[in-house]
Image: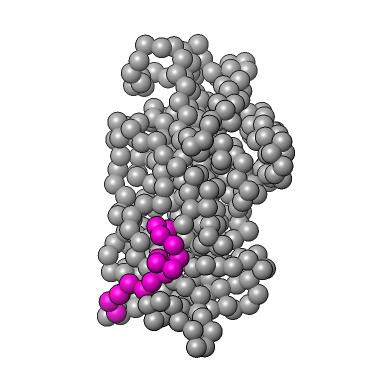
Amino acid sequence: MRGRARLPGCLWLAFVVISAALTYMLASGWKPAGSWDSVLRVLSQSEPEEEPAPIALVVRDPSPEAPLGTRPWDDIREAVLNAINGARVAAGLPKLTFDRQLSDLGDDHCWSMVNGNYASHWTPDGLKPYHRYSLAGGSGLHQQNVAWRRDSRGLDRGAGALKAALESFDAMMAEKPPRDGHRQAILSPYATKVGIGVAVDGEYLAVTHEFASEEVRFLEPLTRRALPKSKLTIRVAVPIGAKLDGIVVRREAPPKPLSTTRLQATSSYEFGGEEVRVLRPVLPAGYEYVDGGRGEIVSRTRGVFACEYTLPSVPGLYDFLAVVEGHVRASVTIAAPPEIVPEIRFKWPGAHRALSRAEQP
């Protein structure tokens, strides 16, 4: 591409694989710091002077019917999908289904990396993968692997891009504990579907694996943008027979733009910010938690739990983490107030994002 700033270095081939610490947290059974006996507590919250209503529900647009083989670079997507499922079957895990919407989400990030000449889980607007998934309408568990490659001989001709994408997958599967975040994501027992993001432009290639599961999920309608001090109704669906431990609420500071230098310096990602509340299931009469509380989450129907929660007055990204049997199994992010993130983040990336810049309208 003409006019593009080059990454430093004199090698004709650069291969970058970004590790994901979140994978360790989720696949290894991440819990908030300390045991549930110590973490299940109620922090004081000031009563709001008024209760402004949540505004503008986000809706995940239906994905167009676009099976594999109908979009540019679907040969790469299909080959990577087969490689992922081959590794899972060998490990005794079920295959993942292909999800075009998750691929659109991945394509959007891949083109951001290729056009911006950076490799990172973050985007220039300061958002992480689980932010982008949730703000656009995702309601379950999400994990991302990222691979980026440059070859001065060109990757947009012949089988160069396909070969490079599969080499990146092999490198991920060759990882050894404890630095095996990509491998753990590929072999996650919770993942049920995957999208493959791809962007190829001249000598640059970016690939993402967008893993997701909605076996545990936050139920809609649930706004992803609200005013501080808004009162929300939170509902979570869990498999029949599974135990909901609680919902952890964390606040992250409003995102700030990241320079290319800062993006290149990032590697792993995790649920950030500070814990502001742990919402707990209501205990039977006569029982209470160690802090004297009885809980906030009630069972509505079999497998569905609900509670009310008022956002604090401090602006930020509020992450709600559903913890089931000691594992984070779903998360949603709510921007309060909405203007702290770009408006486009509240929409699922369109199919045109999968096209090269030359093919885009």
Whether residue 82 appears in this view of the structure is yes
Left or right position of 64 against 316? right
Residue 316 percent coordinates (x, y): 32, 59
Q: Inspect the magenta stretch and tell me whether residue 315 lies in it.
A: no
Residue 339 percent coordinates (x, y): 33, 57
Q: Nearer the viewer, residue 264 or 110?
A: 264
Please report the residue visible at 53 percent of the width from the left and 70 percent of the height from the top. Answer: 235
The main secondary structure of the magenta stretch is loop
State the colouring used for the structure image: one colour
Q: Nearer the viewer, residue 347 or 333?
A: 333
Q: Inspect the magenta stretch and tell me whether residue 41 lies in it.
A: yes
- The quarter in which the N terminus is drawn is top left
Please report the residue visible at 33 percent of the width from the left and 72 percent of the height from the top. Answer: 43
Could you say which quadrant of the image residue 214 lies in? bottom right
Q: Nearer the viewer, residue 248 or 60?
A: 248
Q: Which residues, given as a range, are shown in magenta?
A: 32-47
Please report the residue visible at 33 percent of the width from the left and 32 percent of the height from the top. Answer: 265
Residue 304 percent coordinates (x, y): 60, 72
Please report the residue visible at 50 percent of the width from the left and 30 percent of the height from the top. Answer: 147
Q: Nearer the viewer, residue 175 or 358?
A: 175
Whether residue 232 appears in this view of the structure is no
